[in-house]
Image (cartoon, grey):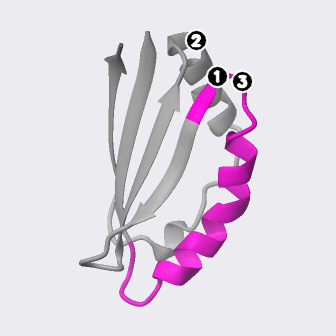
């Protein structure tokens, strides 16, 4: 069963473009990982300082492998964030 992950992030006013630029290399990198079916960053139309990351992994083992790899990677754009990101994951058919 697949794993779906949604991460909501707010950035400081006026930092949305910089946030996207900071994420572009990681988006390209993660999309090549085994089991990655989706790894996309979306920007709100109503508020350009709000973002949603949507991930989909083929199964729990590939998601767990991704999480383990993420623990070895440097963080991205923490200085641009306005508060902590909120992550929700679930198993989907």
The residue positioned 43% from the left and 9% from the top of the image is 1
- Residue 71 appearing in the image: no
The residue positioned 43% from the left and 45% from the top of the image is 54
Using residue 76 as the reference point, say whether residue 85 is left or right of it: left
Image quadrant containing the C terminus:
top left
Q: Which residue is mark 1?
A: 35
Q: Are marks 2 and 1 in contact (CB under 8 Å)?
A: yes
Pick the front one: 31 or 77: 31
> What is the number of the mark on residue 34?
3
Q: Which residue is mark 2?
A: 61
Magenta-colored span: 11-37
Pick the front one: 7 or 71: 7
Are there few (<14), some (14-19), or many (20+) residues within 10 Å of tag 3?
few
Asked if the stretch drawn in magenta spans residue 87, the answer is no
Dot 3 or dot 2, earlier in sequence: 3
Q: Are marks 3 and 1 in contact (CB under 8 Å)?
A: yes
């Amino acid at each position: 069963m697949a794993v779906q992950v949604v991460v909501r992030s707010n950035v400081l006013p006026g930092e949305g473009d910089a946030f996207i630029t900071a994420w572009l290399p990681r988006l390209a990198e993660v999309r090549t990982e085994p089991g990655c079916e989706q790894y996309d960053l979306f920007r709100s139309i109503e508020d350009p300082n709000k973002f949603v990351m949507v991930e989909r992994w083929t199964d729990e083992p590939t998601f767990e492998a991704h999480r383990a790899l993420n623990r070895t990677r440097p963080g991205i754009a923490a200085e641009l964030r306005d508060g902590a990101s909120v992550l929700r994951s679930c198993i989907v058919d």
